[in-house]
Image: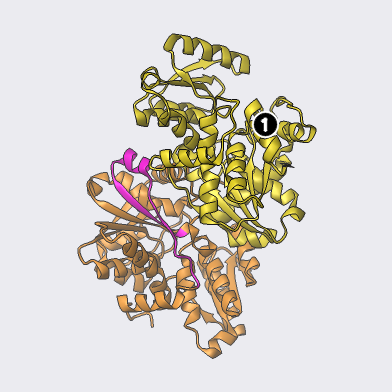
Chain colours: A yellow, B orange
Amino acid sequence: MSTIIPQFSDIQDAHNRIKSFIHKTPVLSSNSINEILNINLSFKCENFQKVGAFKFRGATNAVRLLDKKEVEKGVTTHSSGNHAAALSLAAKQLGVPAHIVMPTSAPEIKKKAVEGYGAKITFCEPTLQAREETLRIVQSKTGATFIHPYDNFNVICGQGTSAKELLEEVPDLDVIIAPIGGGGLMSGTVISAKSINPEIKVYGAEPLNADDAFRSFKQGVFIPAGPPNTIADGLLTSLSPLTFQIIRENLDDILTAREETIVEAMRMIWERMKIIVEPSAAVPLAAIIENKYLFKGKKIGLIVSGGNVDLNNLPF
Amino acid sequence: MSTIIPQFSDIQDAHNRIKSFIHKTPVLSSNSINEILNINLSFKCENFQKVGAFKFRGATNAVRLLDKKEVEKGVTTHSSGNHAAALSLAAKQLGVPAHIVMPTSAPEIKKKAVEGYGAKITFCEPTLQAREETLRIVQSKTGATFIHPYDNFNVICGQGTSAKELLEEVPDLDVIIAPIGGGGLMSGTVISAKSINPEIKVYGAEPLNADDAFRSFKQGVFIPAGPPNTIADGLLTSLSPLTFQIIRENLDDILTAREETIVEAMRMIWERMKIIVEPSAAVPLAAIIENKYLFKGKKIGLIVSGGNVDLNNLPF
């Protein structure tokens, strides 16, 4: 499945499939941020999505496409974050068992959320190897279907529905910008945006301290993520072969942002818009702040990926 | 002016007057909070109002009613918080000079906001006496019109437009609850609510540690606020003769909340709704949590008064 590239018609189908299960998130703007930065921004607020992140779109699409036998055996994934919660809730809503492999280092709030949705958690050491190994054990025990957080056709189609909604509400955008972690949101976003308007520019935004997608994109070869060193904890993962291919072939550019600008952007959104966004969701605004010349006079849409933060551990 | 009680027709006039200058703030609900508390809540989100608080409604109404001579000489007030910012912006939008008396102890963020709106600040010692004395000096120098934060007919009419909008959007509420500080929001709210639906119950919410309005209401005599000892820094002030009269004659009851419940309610709103509300704005939800038996099976509207918090000084 993962060598086939999703088309916009797949995203349209996904949207029809998941529409009644997801929130149609609001598009907000802030006169005050527009004035400070002298730009024109529309924020597509996936922080108000169920489980507080866009991930619920992709997980719901994947779960709703399971066949009868797969529904019985359930789904599984490894994730320390929003995908775990999203898959758990999407599975719960359909009465599907969910088996989640989480590193012991995962934030307490995420563990609680996953438990709250009735998923069965198997903890493992916080390494990719341990996660994959534990997942294989869980899979062989349960027969559950692995729903990868982004290297998955159906997940990417679900994520692409956010940009589709954004462009339906604000059709005259010149630019769309989204954060890049594993590239699922970015892939769905660029397919939707370029299909709806071939003239639109689509940028990815990445922390400078986790710029593996930036370097992969620039050099044209896949470079895995190095050791994570960024506050944007949703953007630590590497691209997959599928997301790298989509991004390389469709994206206009990838912009990076320094850590202090990410915190500045996050603070600006909290203070000026009175909404809670997680650090990863502030990376696109940070990239805009650091590359203002690109956006002068443009109408910009920005995907706010999520709003799950640990209030006991804020950067300000 | 301040011995005349505003009627609902005055609030309707105020609404027509200020409509194009204010935000029509959204009404949000949270399945997750409704499930946790087993109630049905609609949040009228004045944290998304201009300057981040309902105060902009009353200030705009007052400023738009100045005559030509008053417009020239400007407006003045003493305030450490949201009313100062609201009056400054309302005045700026009409090209009216604003002279604000602020205690030196006012939060930096509020000082900056007021300056940013082009008002002239005169600092004074953080006592009511110093504030009133300094205001008199400013007034005699400038001839500016004093816009009291709540003991003002036009301000109360402006504040009442929030509950009016809420009931226009959710007409079948059984209960409305709002925080009480000086009583301007509460007065406007109860006049609007009881006029639109005489059957509706209207409650005030107050921190137990600043329960002067509660005690005044219960004993039927005005009791001034004691020394402040609550995180809800918007609710430290005493009622005025005008607001006490309106509240005493119209309110169904005043409910109090403990400090830890206020922080719990604030955190619940931040985490579950992904919106930023200030401690004062969480007091109604805290009062609901502490008095759940009153709200069983009821459809409740709650005025979220504002969202101005100092991110460097959070209670969690």
Above or below, comparing residue B179 to residue A50 in the picture? below
B171 part of magenta stretch: no
Extent of the magenta region: B21-46
Task: Give A19 or B137, whichever is nearer the viewer.
Answer: A19
Spot occupied by residue B229 in the image (x, y as percentages of width and height): 45, 51
- The quarter of the picture where residue A39 lies is bottom right
Residue at the spot 48% in from the left edge and 26% down from the top edge: A111
Circle count: 1
| Mark 1, secondary structure of its residue | helix
* Residue under label 1: A245
Residue at the spot 40% in from the left edge and 74% down from the top edge: B15
Residue A123 located left or right of residue A186: left
**Extreme left residue here?**
B199
Q: Which chain carries label 1?
A: A
Residue A201 located left or right of residue B195: right
Residue at the spot 24% in from the left edge and 56% down from the top edge: B174
Spot occupied by residue A57 in the image (x, y as percentages of width and height): 48, 37
Residue at the spot 69% in from the left edge and 28% down from the top edge: A228
B22 part of magenta stretch: yes
Is residue B263 something that shows in the picture? yes
